[in-house]
Amino acid sequence: MTNALTVPSISGSLESYIQSANSFPLLSQEEENKLARRLRDQGDITAAQQLILSHLRFVVTIARNYKGYGLPQADLIQEGNVGLMKAVKRFDPERGVRLVSFAVHWIKAEIHEFIMRNWRLVKIATTKQQRKLFFNLRSLKQGLDTMSPAEVKQVAEQLNVKPEEVVEMEKRFSGSDVPLEPLSDDEDNNYSPIAYLADGLDPSQILEAEQDKVRRGEGLQQSLDCLDERSRHIIEARWLREKDTATLHELADELGVSAERVRQIEAKAIQKIRHVMTTE
């Protein structure tokens, strides 16, 4: 559907695009439902285009709420438009709701995914819970200053998470200058952002490919069998679950070691997996 549609280009002036988006007339609910039925029953691309054009202004409004992430507004709008197109394709006029209400979820979802893919090289949020904390923390955090213990406690209670999770996410979010490596040999008392940086092993690409091999019953099982029980548990919890993957700190609490120690075990395990996979 999307390849056949024509929507205003954002490649030129952003202001010109916004003026163009605001120039398309809004639809009444009756007009909206009529067009949606034409799309659903007849595959009418022209109807889909009218639905999309009439809602471009709403994408602009939603995208403006994400200015604070330092990403180009045009890119945020473009991603929101992708979400709008997905919503139009799935919209059911018989449910009795307006398209704009239905589309909000899809627009925000695409923008969120874009932000998470492009927000620095650091893995700010790797699980569903962390993503929720990331976006909620930005809206609750007042100003750019580091939160006080009282503010941390208040936010933690509001979001129903641990205070240390709020502190950790704030550090990732604020991008404050901290050493990459631990400052002392006492690993149990050290926090090191090196734990969240991609290293030369490129585990995301390696393990993404290996997940496919698990489904086909090839390769990965043999390499996992070469790991000790703790290393295997860390790899499975961090990379091989389809949802609710574990964080370094969650595994650290479970295993009774520091997050830095979990990262070290994980790195060695990935290196061993790579060796086994490439030598077979």
Image (cartoon, rainbow, N blue to C red):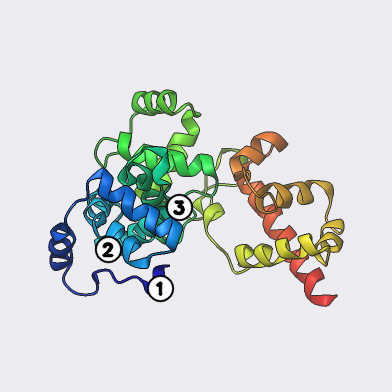
Q: Secondary structure at mark 3?
A: helix
Q: Is residue 209 left or right of residue 137?
A: right
- Is 278 located above or below residue 34 in the figure? below
Residue 55, by quadrant, is bottom left
Circle 3: residue type: Arg
Tell me: residue 277, above or below residue 251. Answer: below
Q: Secondary structure at mark 1?
A: helix
* Front residue (pair 215, 173): 215
Q: Measure the alpha-carbon separation of dots 3 and 1.
A: 16 Å
Evaluate if marks 2 and 1 touch, with contact meaning CB atoms under 8 Å apart: no
Q: Residue at x 31, y 38 (%)?
A: 139
Q: Nearer the viewer, mark 3 or mark 2?
A: 3
The span from disc 3 to disc 2 (Cα, nearest Å) is 28 Å
Q: Which residue is rendered at x = 62% and y = 38% of the image?
A: 250
Residue 186 visible in the shown view: no
Q: What amino acid is at disc 2? A: Pro
Q: Earlier in the sequence, mark 3 or mark 2?
A: 2
* Label 3 packing within 10 angstroms: few (<14), some (14-19), many (20+): some
Report how many numbered discs are placed on residues in the image: 3
Tag 1: residue type? Asn
Q: Say few, some or many: other residues with alpha carbon within 10 Å of mark 2 (under 14 / 14 to 19 / 20 or more).
A: few
Q: Which of these two is toward me, 76 or 84?
A: 84
- Does the residue at mark 3 contact the one at mark 1 (Cβ under 8 Å)? no
- Residue depth check, mark 2 versus mark 1: number of the one nearer the observer: 1
Q: Secondary structure at mark 2?
A: loop
Q: Earlier in the sequence, mark 2 or mark 1?
A: 1
The residue positioned 40% from the left and 68% from the top of the image is: 2
**Residue 210 in the image, given as x and y percentages of width and height:** 72, 64
Q: Which residue does the numbered mark 3 point to in the structure image?
A: 90
| Label of residue 72 in the image | 2
Circle number at residue 3: 1
